[in-house]
Image: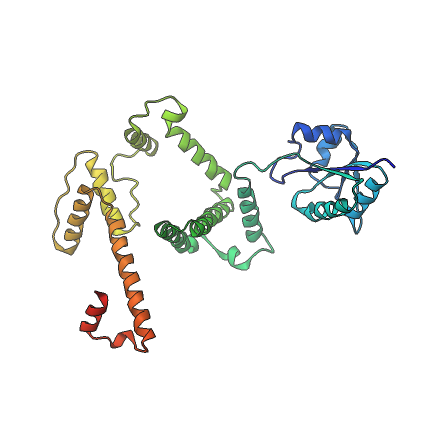
Amino acid sequence: MTSGRVVVVATSPHTPPGLLSWRAWEVLRAGPVLVGRADHPQVPHLVDASVQVDLLEGPDVAAELHSRAAAGAQLVWLADGAADEDVVRRHGRLVLRDRDIELEVVYGSHDPPGARLLDVVAVMDRLRSPGGCPWDAQQTHDSLKPYLLEEAYEAYQAIEDGDLVDLREELGDVLLQVAFHARLAQEHATEPWSIDDLAGDLVDKLVRRHPHVFAGADPHDLDGTWERLKAEEKGRTSVTEGVPLGQPALSLAAKLQKRGSRIGAPVPSYDGLGGQLWDLVARCREAGLDPEAELRSVARTYRDRLAAVERAVLEEGRDPKDLTPEEWAGRWS
């Protein structure tokens, strides 16, 4: 008996239908081609290419494929991404039991970098659409503001901790906020924009602000070029414009002092406790230090030591609130 053969053409759901590799098209045109559902996204393009496509349905598609191949048939199974993983896996196990059947997998398309971002958009759309999540449906740009800051701070902390696994998760949460706000903007009645508009604006900005990469400009004046282009784009008349006032005070002071230094402005002194902090920021900048990072480092050291003392006192069966000032001093040292 002539041995049968099954060629599985695997495709990515993120690749536009019809955009297949040359090897995949060779296999598909040789046929016969079988699919598991009539609305397979590749079918119209195969029909346009005069490729005959037949529907294979039933309670056990993998067993039917194996049965036809065992009878000597030469088949092409056009897989439907993740939906057909079980079919392909089960058929592979059946082939292992029957050495007379050949099995080949041809990759018709691969996920391009960033392909899973399409899934983020699709899931966000599902959550906000009728029948989705009631909580997500109630959110607005204003209600989401705290989460945007919270997720950004958690990602910042993961970087401080050097925890790349946690950073991956936290940046995912930041990405969720971007996708969420873009989805809300898409629903705006008079000024809608989508995540594609957002991404397009970002690409245009990156290309425009990197003329040394995309337009052959002088790469030795990056800071000056960057700031000049931003000023031209925004129509800014002051170096202070564009500095977000909502950032932590130490970072805000450092940023404003840095902006002022670009045009030779002095760093004046001010009275009161705020003035002392302002002077401290200036001293940090003179030393090449980030005042926000320096204070955060000290605060984290304090947090770690305080937590360690608390644990030790609790293990002794005491309440940390009962420690005397002298005991606190002794344990701290």
Is residue 132 shown left or right of residue 71?
left
Drawn side of residue 284 relative to residue 101, left or right: left
Where the N terminus falls, by quadrant? top right
Query: What colouring does the structure picture have?
Result: rainbow
Give the x, y percent position of residue 166.
Answer: 43, 52
Query: Closest to the observer: 9 or 279?
Result: 9
Q: Position of residue 251 (x, y in %)?
A: 26, 48
Does residue 253 lie above or below 102 as drawn? below
Question: Compared with residue 147, is residue 282 higher up or lower down, i.e. above or below?
Answer: above
Indicate the quadrant where residue 300 lies.
Answer: bottom left
Q: Nearer the viewer, residue 103 or 128?
A: 103
Name the residue furthest top: 216
Q: Is residue 161 visible?
A: yes
Q: In front here: 162 or 99?
A: 99
Residue 112 coordinates in the image, percent (x, y): 56, 36
Q: Quadrant of the C terminus?
A: bottom left
Q: Quadrant of residue 214?
A: top left
Across and down, in percent, residue 13 comes to 63, 40
Seen as rendered, the residue at the extreme front is 99
**Can you tell which quarter of the image residue 257 is in?**
top left
